[in-house]
């Protein structure tokens, strides 16, 4: 037996000779051995410490043969700690008493005088049992914690604005179906977070979530990455490798930046999705696939279909349900929440005593256009925390790109002038569509001629 293999052992017996003999024997094998003559101190001992194994005498001074006192204290121990590992010891045991002891909750039963090797082996076995109890408890706690974390509605997606509430409602509706989902949105709006939220709430949540950045896969590696290959299929194929489709089988496959695929690669992807099977490079065997497909892109896929740079049949295949994420400038009311979230993260990471962000700073942040969206906001906040000296972040702490400062005034709650409101809404639509009159007019519900009139009216 390895030195100090056993943990902390508590021995309770009214015979001092027994206590000393047991301690002398076990201290060579245990990390710590505590002995106690008075059983009435058991509650105190259990309240103040934990033990891997408890050796409990069954008969004390009041009763030397029946074992009633031992059973009484065993019940007290188990009531206080149901996972306590207790070995009963007595000089007056029989089969009936041993069976009763096990039924009441004892782990084992040892007769005096014991054989040293047998006692050490019995305690060693009991100690391993206690370790398994502890492991189960740790796993149970971890499982509960994970379930609580998952159950927190959209924990990683921060937002209370109406555009985000619309997104949350759509996620709730579609998550438990197997419908293919296409997530649209600018870079940095949180498309992968939405994909993970869909998976976490799906019927496949216990299976794997596989994310693939399609924009980072070259033409030559596309089939190998997605469909896998056999050893020797090409020069660098030194072993069999499963593709992302196989890895994601029974789970969720997230194809990010799908708009970056060339037409030939789109055709190969479409074939796999239609047939629901793939074939590894170098193999004649087909592999059936069962996946929940989620795709995302920041590209204008509908315009790409119009100019024949994206396959219409592939678009139909991947967007049974479509989720459009708003840009940060379209949900400015969420900026204070996001700033607070990132300040807490980076204050802790960089050990900065940041208490709050000033009103002027928040006003400055809300007036900014955020071309990089939430990702840009996160970097700006991180930099401001790193460079801060005090406990308050003011407007001078936030360095923003002058080119992205908003030219567009923000509608305030106290603006009631209809001409001013109309001017700001028209300007916002023009900015959103980068000066495209047709798209801006459609967004505003106007004809092109009507929009031109308003532009002239407001001097825009």
Image (cartoon, rainbow, N blue to C red):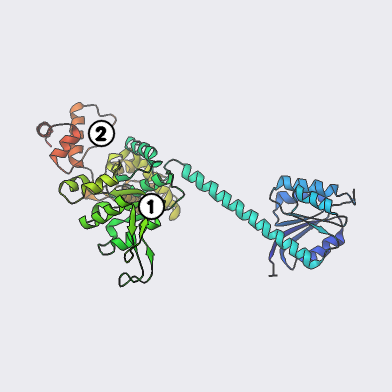
- Circle 2 residues within 10 Å: few <14, some 14–19, many ≥20: few
How many labels, in total?
Answer: 2
Q: Is residue 155 left or right of residue 412?
A: right
447 versus 2 height, above or below: above
- Kindly identify which residue carries mark 2: 411
Determine the residue positioned at 27% across, 53% down: 271
246 versus 179 height, above or below: below
From where the camera sits, is residue 428 visible?
yes
From where the camera sits, is residue 184 visible?
no
Q: Quadrant of the N terminus?
A: bottom right
Q: Is residue 410 left or right of residue 28?
A: left
Please report whichever mark, 1 or 2, sits nearer to the chain's N-terminal start: 1
- Between 275 and 158, the one lying in front of the other is 275
Residue 312 picture location, percent across and down: 21, 47
The label number, if any, that marks residue 230 in the structure image = none
Determine the residue positioned at 15% across, 35% down: 441
Q: Which quadrant of the figure has residue 222? A: bottom left
- Kindly identify which residue carries mark 1: 385
Residue 66 picture location, percent across and down: 88, 49
Helix, strand or loop under label 1: helix
Q: Is residue 186 left or right of residue 230?
A: left
């Amino acid at each position: 037996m390895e030195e100090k293999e056993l943990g902390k052992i508590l021995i309770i017996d009214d015979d001092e000779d027994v206590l000393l003999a047991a301690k002398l024997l076990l201290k060579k094998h245990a990390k710590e051995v505590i002995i106690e003559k008075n059983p009435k101190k058991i509650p105190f001992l259990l309240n103040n410490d934990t033990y891997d194994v408890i050796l409990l005498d069954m008969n004390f001074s009041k009763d030397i043969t029946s074992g009633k006192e031992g059973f009484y204290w065993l019940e007290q121990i188990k009531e206080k700690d149901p996972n306590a590992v207790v070995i009963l010891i007595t000089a007056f045991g029989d089969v009936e008493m041993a069976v009763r002891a096990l039924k009441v909750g004892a782990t084992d039963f040892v007769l005096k005088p014991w054989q040293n090797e047998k006692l050490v082996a019995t305690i060693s076995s009991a100690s391993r049992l206690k370790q398994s109890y502890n492991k189960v408890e740790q796993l149970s706690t971890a499982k509960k914690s994970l379930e609580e974390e998952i159950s927190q509605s959209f924990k990683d997606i921060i937002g209370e604005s109406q555009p985000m509430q619309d997104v949350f409602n759509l996620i709730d509706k579609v998550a438990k179906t197997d419908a293919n989902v296409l997530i649209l949105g600018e870079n940095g709006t949180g498309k992968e977070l939405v994909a993970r939220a869909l998976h976490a709430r799906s019927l496949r949540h216990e299976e794997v979530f596989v994310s693939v950045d399609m924009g980072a896969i070259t033409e030559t590696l596309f089939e190998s990455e997605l469909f896998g290959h056999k050893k020797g299929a090409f020069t660098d194929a030194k072993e069999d490798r499963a593709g992302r489709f196989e890895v994601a089988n029974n789970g969720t496959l997230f194809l990010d930046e799908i708009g970056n695929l060339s037409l030939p690669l789109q055709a190969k992807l479409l074939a796999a999705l239609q047939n629901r099977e793939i074939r590894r490079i170098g193999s004649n065997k087909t592999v059936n696939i069962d996946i929940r497909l989620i795709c995302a892109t920041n590209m204008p896929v509908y315009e790409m279909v119009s100019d024949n740079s994206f396959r219409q049949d592939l678009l139909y295949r991947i967007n049974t349900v479509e989720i459009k994420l708003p840009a940060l400038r379209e949900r400015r009311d969420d900026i204070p929440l996001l700033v607070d979230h990132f300040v807490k993260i980076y204050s802790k990471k960089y050990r900065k005593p940041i208490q709050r962000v000033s009103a002027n700073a928040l006003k400055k942040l809300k007036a900014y256009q955020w071309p990089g969206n939430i990702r840009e906001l996160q970097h700006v906040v991180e930099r401001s925390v790193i460079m801060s000296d005090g406990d308050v972040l003011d407007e001078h702490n936030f360095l923003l790109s002058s080119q992205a400062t908003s030219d567009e005034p923000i509608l305030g709650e106290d603006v009631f002038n209809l001409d001013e409101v109309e001017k700001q809404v028209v300007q916002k639509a023009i900015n959103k569509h980068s000066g495209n009159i047709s798209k801006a007019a459609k967004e505003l519900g106007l004809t092109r001629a009507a929009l031109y009139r308003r532009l002239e009216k407001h001097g825009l």
